[in-house]
Image: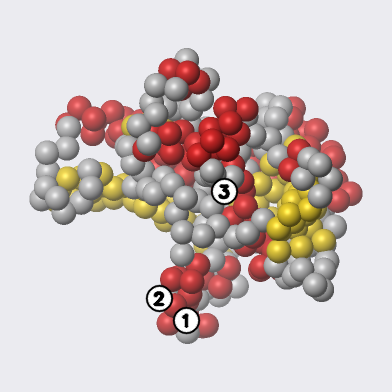
Amino acid sequence: MSELLEKLIFSRVKPRFRRVSSGIGLDEADDGATIPLSFRGHLVVSVDSYTVNPPFFPGGNIGSLAATGSINDVVVMGARPIAVLDSIVVEEGFSMRDLEVIVDSMISILEDEGVALIGGDFKVMPRGQVDKIVITTTAIGVAENPILDRPRPGDKILVSDYVGEHGAVVLLMQLGLTNVEEISKGLLKSDVKPLTKLMLPLVEKYRDCITAARDPTRGGLAGVLYEWAVKTGTLVVIDESQVPVREPVKRYSESLGVDPLYLASEGVAVLALRSECSEEVLEYVRKLGFENARIIGEVRESEMFRGYIAAETPVGGLRVVEPPRGELVPRIC
């Protein structure tokens, strides 16, 4: 995907058209962009299309996923979300009852988060011209001081919760393994949830400590860390034993030959923190209700391994974590 975007989009847009004034734009290839406001702060905007298959999964559906995903893309840039626009495209013959449940789920998330739905678009396509349903959402937020993804050598990497749960659940659903014990008992489900209760108080109290923030959706934790390493020319080293992965996710991933580091999460934040305040931030994150938060590694300088991720294995060795390639789980978000 990164190669396609570079060839198709980035190489075609002239540098002066990649951002607005001093805002964050196309050069950063972040989950969103910012527009400096004349009086104070920045307008933060993010757009994403959701095509998850199946549209209903344990823990949520494409409607709750769309609302949550766009809110999270805004809050990890340090912004308070204020409004969303949506575009819904459905296939002729799509169940009206299912459509109502999906829309209600999306609206419920927005109302719970105090985010206005200010406009959108709705289309029905002839049968066979679109696969079931596609939802595109644009989220708008306001930030005093947006978070620019710039981890520095010495920074610690914090993960707010268990990783890979959304990807694992959707993978099992796509393989028809809907009756596995953990799913049937409700012990394994998508982690889809807004990150406002984490990021808004964290930005207010510890903004100067945060050097980068992302939610590890497509490409998972490995995707986020690889982008940071390449962007900054650093080496990211993680301790695999400290990466929080729930036991069912680990077990099913291993049996299917998938590394949980590459599986998407939809309710997790990955933060790069200045070393001197990282432990204090970790304690605060846990007090906010994210008891599974861990510091899993750090950013290092390295002339030989610039742009790499290295994982310390449980037996004491090191392995290179390759960048995500292809789609491990098609139509996951």
Judging from the image, what secondary structure is the residue with disc 2 in? helix
- Where residue 70 appears, x then y in whole percent? 46, 47
2 or 3: mark nearer the eye: 3
Image coordinates of residue 313 in percent, x first then y, are 77, 45
The residue lying toward the viewer, choosing from 165 and 312, is 312
CA neighbours of label 1 inside 10 A, class few (<14), some (14 to 19), many (20+): few
Going by the numbered disc 3, the residue's amino acid type is Tyr
Mark 3 or 1 closer to N-term?
1
Q: CA distance from mark 1 to mark 2?
A: 7 Å
Q: Residue placed at 36% from the left, 38% from the top?
A: 174
| Residue 11 marker | 1
- Viewer-proximal residue, 132 or 83? 132
Q: Is residue 103 above or below residue 44?
A: above
Horizontal and vertical percent for residue 293? 72, 34
- Of labels 2 and 3, earlier in sequence is 2
Q: Is residue 322 above or below residue 255?
A: below
Give the residue at mark 2.
8
User: What is the three-letter code of the residue carrying label 1?
Assistant: Ser
**Does residue 332 show up?**
yes
Q: Residue at x 81, y 42 (%)?
A: 315
Furthest toward the top, the residue is 185
Which numbered marker is on residue 283?
Answer: none
Give, as a three-letter code, the residue at label 2.
Answer: Leu
Residue 37 rendering spot, x and y as whole percentages: 55, 64
Q: Nearer the viewer, mark 3 or mark 1?
A: 3
Determine which residue is flagged by label 3. 262
Answer yes or no: do the residues labelled 1 and 2 have beta carbons within 8 Å? Answer: yes
Instruction: Say if 128 sits above or below 315 in the image.
Output: below
